[in-house]
Image (tube, grey):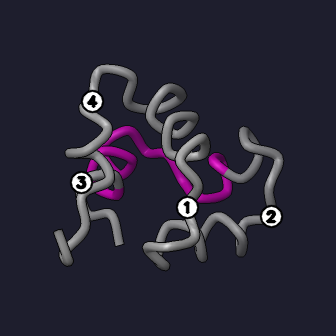
Amino acid sequence: MYRNLEGELRKQGITRQKIAEDMHLNVSTVSRKLTEIDRLKLWEAYKIRDLYCPSANLEWLFATDAA
C-alpha cells in the first residue's frame, strides 16, 4: 500500500474510479495495483504522479511500509 499516495489522493477527492477512467483501466485493476506492491509498473507510477501530484517526489509518493 502506498500510504503517501493514498493520503494525497484523499486530500484531492480523487477516487480509484477516477484513476481508472483517466488511465483507461478497470477499477479492480487499479485497486490491485495500488494495494499489491509488485503490480504497479514504473510508467504507471509516473502517470499517476503527473496526473494528480505533479509536484510530489516519486520515491516519497510511492514509498511502502517495507521500505
- Give, as a three-letter code, the residue at label 2: Asn
- Give, as a three-letter code, the residue at label 3: Asn
Q: At x 20% / y 77%, what residue is drawn?
A: 66
When the figure is inspected, residue 47 is found, relative to residue 23, above or below; the finding is above
Classify residue 7 by image quadrant. Answer: bottom left
Q: Secondary structure at mark 2?
A: loop
Horizontal side of residue 15 vs 5, given as left or right: right
Q: Does the magenta segment cover residue 18?
A: yes
Q: Give how far apart the Cα atoms at labels 1 and 2 are.
A: 14 Å
The reply to whether the C-beta atoms of the residues labelled 2 and 3 are less than 8 Å apart is no
Q: Quadrant of the C terminus?
A: bottom left
Q: Give how far apart the Cα atoms at labels 4 and 3 are.
A: 10 Å
When the figure is inspected, residue 40 is found, relative to residue 39, above or below; the finding is above
Tell me the residue that label 4 is attached to. 56
Mark 1 or 4: the one toward you: 1
Residue furthest top in the image: 55
Residue range in magenta is: 6-19
The reply to whether the C-beta atoms of the residues labelled 2 and 4 are less than 8 Å apart is no
Going from N to C along the chain, the mark reached first, 1 or 2, is 2
Tell me the residue that label 1 is attached to. 40
Q: Which mark is residue 4?
A: 3
Q: At x 49% / y 26%, what residue is drawn?
A: 50
In-front residue for pair 46/13 = 46
Mark 1 or 3: the one toward you: 1
Give the crowd class for mark 4: few <14, some 14-19, many >=20 residues within 10 Å: some
Q: Position of residue 40 (x, y in %)?
A: 55, 61
Q: Does the magenta segment cover residue 50?
A: no
Q: At x 71% / y 70%, what residue is drawn?
A: 29
